[in-house]
Image (tube, rainbow, N blue to C red):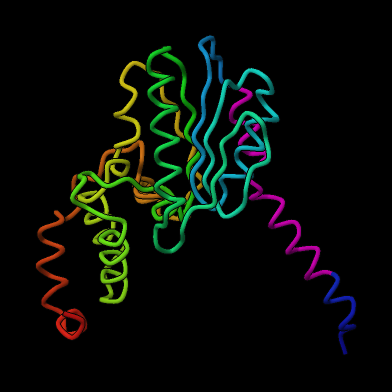
C-alpha cells in the first residue's frame, strides 16, 4: 500500500514547482533585462498578475523606472507606483480611478517620447475602465457586463461589446501615446494568437475576425435569458 504521507509530500513538491515555473516576477525580470532602452521608462501593469509583474520590473530596472500605474487584486507597495485594486468581475470606482491615473501617465510619457512598458494579464478587463463617452456611466458598464455574462456570451462576444463602450480597450491605451515606444508583455491563459483577448487588449487592435458589437447585441438580446431580464 502506498505511503500516503509520502504521496502528499511529493504532490506538494510538484505543485510548488509548477507555481514557481510560472511565477510572473522572475519571467518579467528576465524579459526586461534583455531590453536596451535609452529613453525615460514608464509602466502600466494590469490584471491579476500585475503586482508580481511590477515586482519583476522593479527587480530589473530599479531607479531607471520613472513611474508606473498598477491595477490588480493586491496593492503594489512602491513609491514609484500608483497602485489600485480594481473591480472584478465587474468594474468599480477604483477601475475608473486606475484609468484616470494611467491616462495621465501616458500623457506625461508621450510628451517625453518615453518608453512605456505594458504588463498585461488576465482579469484586467474589469480592473481598469474608462467609458468612450460621457453619456456612459459606470452603472451602464456594469449592467452591460452582467447581461453579457448571464446570457452566455463567449469571451470574443463580450470583448467586442466592451471595446465599443471603452476608451482603454482594443488598443485604446496605446493610442494615447503615439510618440512613445510601446512594449507589451502579456501573461496569457488564452489560445496562441489570441493575446488581444487578455484584459481586452489595451495595447492591441481587435482581431480581424472579431464580431461587431451590433452583431453581438442583436444575437444576445434574442436569447430567452435576456428577454426575461428586460
Q: Residue at x 45, y 43 (%)?
A: 98
Residue 158 left/right relative to 35: left
Along the line of sight, which residue is nearer the eye, 184 or 78?
78
Residue 173's x, y, as percent?
Answer: 34, 35
- Residue at left 16%, top 71%? 220
Q: Is residue 143 above or below residue 113?
A: below
Above or below for 15 versus 6: above
Residue 201, horizontal then vertical, whole percent: 35, 44
The stretch in magenta equals 10-34
Q: From the image, give the main secondary structure of the stretch colored magenta.
A: helix
Relative vertical location of residue 9 with respect to residue 5 in this rendering, above or below: above
Which quadrant is home to the N terminus? bottom right
> Residue 115 at x, y = what percent?
47, 19
Q: Quadrant of residue 68?
A: top right
Q: Does 227 lie within the magenta span?
A: no
Residue 179 appears left or right of 118: left
Residue at 67% across, 19% down? 63
* 62 shown above or below 208: above
Amino acid at each position: 500500500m502506498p505511503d500516503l504521507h509520502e504521496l502528499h509530500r511529493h504532490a506538494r513538491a510538484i505543485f510548488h514547482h509548477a507555481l514557481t515555473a510560472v511565477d510572473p516576477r522572475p519571467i518579467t525580470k528576465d524579459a526586461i533585462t534583455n531590453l536596451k532602452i535609452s529613453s525615460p521608462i514608464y509602466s502600466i501593469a494590469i490584471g491579476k498578475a500585475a503586482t508580481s509583474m511590477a515586482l519583476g520590473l522593479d527587480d530589473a530596472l530599479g531607479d531607471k523606472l520613472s513611474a508606473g500605474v498598477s491595477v490588480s487584486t493586491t496593492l503594489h507597495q512602491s513609491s514609484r507606483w500608483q497602485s489600485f485594486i480594481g473591480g472584478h468581475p465587474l468594474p468599480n470606482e477604483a477601475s475608473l480611478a486606475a484609468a484616470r491615473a494611467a491616462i495621465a501617465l501616458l500623457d506625461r510619457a508621450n510628451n517625453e517620447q518615453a518608453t512605456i512598458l505594458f504588463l498585461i494579464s488576465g482579469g484586467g478587463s474589469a480592473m481598469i475602465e474608462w467609458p468612450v463617452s460621457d453619456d456612459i456611466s459606470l452603472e451602464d458598464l456594469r449592467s452591460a457586463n452582467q447581461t453579457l455574462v448571464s446570457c452566455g456570451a463567449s469571451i470574443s462576444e463580450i470583448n467586442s461589446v466592451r471595446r465599443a463602450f471603452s476608451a482603454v480597450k482594443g488598443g485604446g491605451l496605446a493610442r494615447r501615446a503615439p510618440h512613445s515606444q510601446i512594449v507589451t508583455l502579456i501573461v496569457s491563459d488564452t489560445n496562441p494568437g489570441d493575446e488581444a483577448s487578455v484584459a481586452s487588449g489595451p495595447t492591441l487592435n481587435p482581431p480581424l475576425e472579431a464580431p461587431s458589437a451590433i452583431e453581438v447585441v442583436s444575437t444576445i438580446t434574442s436569447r430567452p435569458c435576456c428577454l426575461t431580464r428586460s
